[in-house]
Image: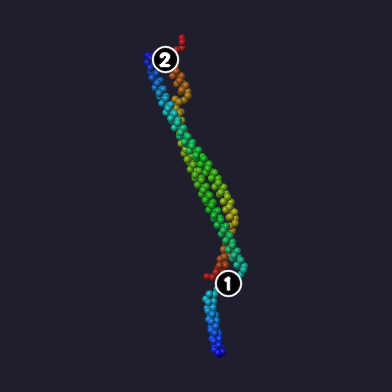
Amino acid sequence: MLKKQLTVSRKNIEKNNMKRILLMLLMTVTLNCYSQEIIEIPQEELNEFFLAIDTLKEQDSIKTTLIYDLESQIRNYEMLSKQDSIILNYRLQQVKILNEQIQLYDDRLKVVDKWYKKPWVGVVGGVVGTLITIHVIDYSLPR
Amino acid sequence: MKTIWKVILGIGGAIAGILAIFASTKQSQSKKEFSRRVKANEDKLDFITKSVDKVKKEKAVTKSNIKKTSAKIKTTKSKVKSTKDAKKTVDSFEKKYRKK
């Protein structure tokens, strides 16, 4: 009975040993396959690198703001140019209307400013007309 | 003889009167038309003046915006520094430690 137990125990130990050996073999293979190279970087270099990255990040942000501002300025200038064009168009229309107005006054003056429409012509005409009328109807003062 | 002159004068006077009425009517119409056209042009000019004033106000706002943005750009530009050294550092770091 004891002998039998000893045999079973030995077999178990052998089995366990085999398992361990197999495990170690597998681990060795795995480590060989997926090993990672570790590089040592001096702290100073790392600090410099991160400082450079920070500078680049900050400058990138500043330049993005600058681009946005410049784009905004371009839009402002476009708006100013548009407003100038509108004013210019209005001025051109104004000039056209004023010329039309001058033409209207000129035409009116041509109609109104005739020689026979002058006051002195009316006075002379009236006097002459009255004289002719008096002469024709043979009007005379009491004698 | 005198009677004939009187008749001629009477007819002439009547014709002149009729012509005067027609002329005055025509003149009045022409004056009305002139006044109407002048008024229309003045209205147009008034509208244009108002519009120009409005656009001028808007232009003043745009100019003020331009001034503000220029100041902002100046401030931002003063913050811009050369990134040459930083780029150099990153490049050398990359060359040194980046696995090819």
Q: Secondary structure at mark 1?
A: loop
Does any portion of residue B68 appear in the rendered image? Answer: yes
Q: Is residue B7 left or right of residue A18?
A: left
- Residue B78 position within the rendered picture, expressed as x and y whole percent measured from the top left: 60, 55
The x and y percentages for residue A34 are 53, 75
Q: Above or below — where is A122 with respect to A53?
A: above
Pick out the residue farthest to the front.
Answer: A1
- Marked residue chain, label 2: A
Three-letter amino acid code at disc 1? Ile
Q: Which residue is mark 1?
A: A39
At a point 57% along the width and 58% down the height, the residue shown is A61
Residues under labels 1 and 2: Cα distance? 140 Å
Q: In the rendering, at what x and y percent does residue A77 appear?
A: 52, 49
- Alpha-carbon neighbours of circle 2 within 10 Å: few (<14), some, or many (≥20)? few
Residue nearest the observer in this picture, B65 or B36? B36
Q: Label 2, on which residue?
A: A137
For image coordinates 49% across by 42% down, the residue present is A90
Q: Secondary structure at mark 2?
A: loop
Image location of residue B17, percent across then percent down: 41, 22
Residue B96 shows which numbered tag?
A: none
Residue type (three-letter) at the residue carrying disc 2: Ile
Which chain letter matches label 1?
A: A
- Asked if A91 appears above or below A6 in the picture, the reply is above
